[in-house]
Structures are given as structure tokens and as C-alpha cells.
Amino acid sequence: MDVPTEMQHQQMGYDRAATMFSPDGHLLQVEYAEKTVRLGSASIGLVCSDGIVIVSDKRIRDKLLATESASKIFEIDHHIIAASAGILADARILVDQAQVLAQQHRIVYDAPIEPIAIIRMIADKKQLFTQYGGARPFGVSIMLAGVHRDKSYLYASDVTGNFFTYKANAIGENDEKIKEMLRSEYKDGMSIDDGIKFSMKIFKEVLGKNFELGRFDVAYVKTGEEKLVRIHGDDLKRYSR
């Protein structure tokens, strides 16, 4: 019986360190971390005509948990927000560092930081942990959205330390299915309200009978205002009809 290539590589020890390449050019520890990201709850980010919006599935299963303590969308600065998929503790460390960088920029330059400077720092940090021994890769994907000088930006950074700019994107569970729907139905110029309705429609189709308004975290930032606004629970009803 033929043994799958990945199993052969495990048996030969190529997955014992994040810095060890397998014979066919793979970093197996990094690929394992990517699988962890796909097990995380999903988030959708959209660039809209009047700003940016992120809709995240908190996927809370414990009724004893206080829902407000399980926010999936982080405030980096007044004009920048981020969502994660994968190991939430890993995301928290990166978000903490991003928040410090944003505040340092305000103190030194008396101006808000550009979103690309934040995502580049996060991506650089992730890449370091695929290159040096003694530490595992970050098991998290970060989606970052922000506005700067009346322009909207959406970025996503993967486990390897790459990042790209998007008009619309999804990370986490069922990301490929959601991306296919975004590719076919996303339209340039939709408003933030339209973007939230569009995202809720996608989640309703993906989650089916498990769809509940209480499991979603929604945040947006409008161009010109550059201020984070959050929407929870019953306030989402008008977006899911």
C-alpha cells in the first residue's frame, strides 16, 4: 500500500521544525498552521463606496459566555479595524503590537498611521516565525481594513507572512465557498449598508439553519469620519431581511 507523501514526510521528521524544508519544497509546520486558520470562524471584509466594513462570525457555542467578551473585530486605531481566523491568542499578540505601533505613530508624527504600515508589520512578524528555529509559526490569518485620506483599504495576511490588497475577501471556515460568492456577486460602489446586507446574505446561505443574528460581530469605518462603529444583536435585524 502506498503511503501518502505528507505522511512519509512526517515519518521522516520534516515537520519537526518550521525551518525544515521537505524534499518537495514544503514547510510542513507552516502548512499545518494554514489548516488551523481554516478551522477558525469566518469573517468577510468589503471595500465600500463610503468606507470599509467587516462582518465576523463569533461562533459562540457556550451559553454561559458573555457575548460582549468574545468580540472578533479589533480596533487598531480610530480608522483601522482587524479580524482574525485561527488561534485567537496568536491574533491578540499581533493586534497588541499593531495598536502600539499606531499610537507611537500618532505621538511621533501627530497623524494617523496608514493601514499598509500596520499590515506590513504584522506580515513581517509572521514571516520571522517561519524562518527561525525554536518557535512555531503564528496560527492565524489577519484581515485588516482602514480608511486614510478619504480612501478605503482592505488587506489580508496569511500564515507565511504574505499580504495582499483586496476589494472583498474572506478568511476562516468556508473561505473558498464565500470567496466564490464574493467573486460572482460583489459590485464596486456598494455602500456600507449594502455591504452588510450582502455579507449577512452570504452567511445565511453558508450557515443555513445555524444562522443567528447573535453570533455576528459587525464593524465599519466611514471615509471622512474615520471612526469605528459597531453593530450587534437586534440592531442587525434590518440587514438580514
Image (cartoon, rainbow, N blue to C red):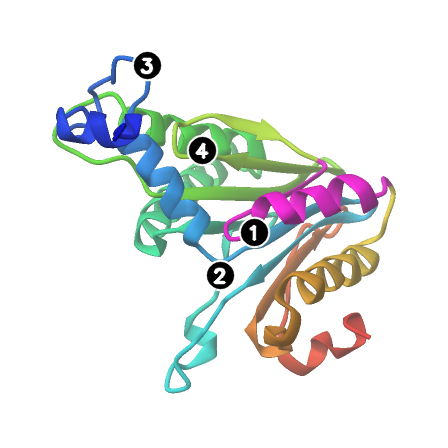
> Looking at this view, is 34 or 234 the one in front?
34
Q: Which residues are magenta?
A: 167-188
In space, the residues marked 3 and 2 are separated at their CA atoms by 34 Å
**How far is mark 1 from mark 4, CA to CA?**
41 Å
N-terminal label among 2 and 1: 2
> How far apart are the alpha carbons under marks 2 and 1?
17 Å
- Residue type marked 4: Val
Is there any visible trace of residue 215 in the rendered image? yes
In this figure, which residue is indicated by the disc labeled 4? 108
- Considering only order in the chain, which callout, 3 or 4, is on the residue closer to the N terminus? 3
- Residue tagged 2: 72
SS at circle 3: loop
Going by the image, does 55 lie left or right of 84?
right
Helix, strand or loop for disc 2: loop
Mark 2 neighbour class, 10 Å CA radius: few under 14, some 14 to 19, many 20 or more: many
Q: Position of residue 120 (x, y in %)?
A: 47, 28
User: In this rendering, is residue 119 above or below 216?
Assistant: above
Q: Earlier in the sequence, mark 4 or mark 2?
A: 2
| Residue denoted by label 1 | 174
The tag earlier along the polypeptide, 3 or 2, is 3
Image position of 106 with respect to 207: above or below: above
Q: Which residue is mark 3?
A: 25
* Discs 3, 1 touching: Cβ within 8 Å: no
Left/right placement of residue 123 relative to residue 198 reads: left
Count of numbered tags: 4
Q: Mark 4 and 3 residues: CB-CB less than 8 Å, in contact?
A: no
Considering depth in this image, is 177 or 67 the residue closer to the camera?
Answer: 177
Mark 1, mark 4: which one is toward the viewer?
A: 1
Verify CB contact (< 8 Å) between mark 4 and mark 2: no
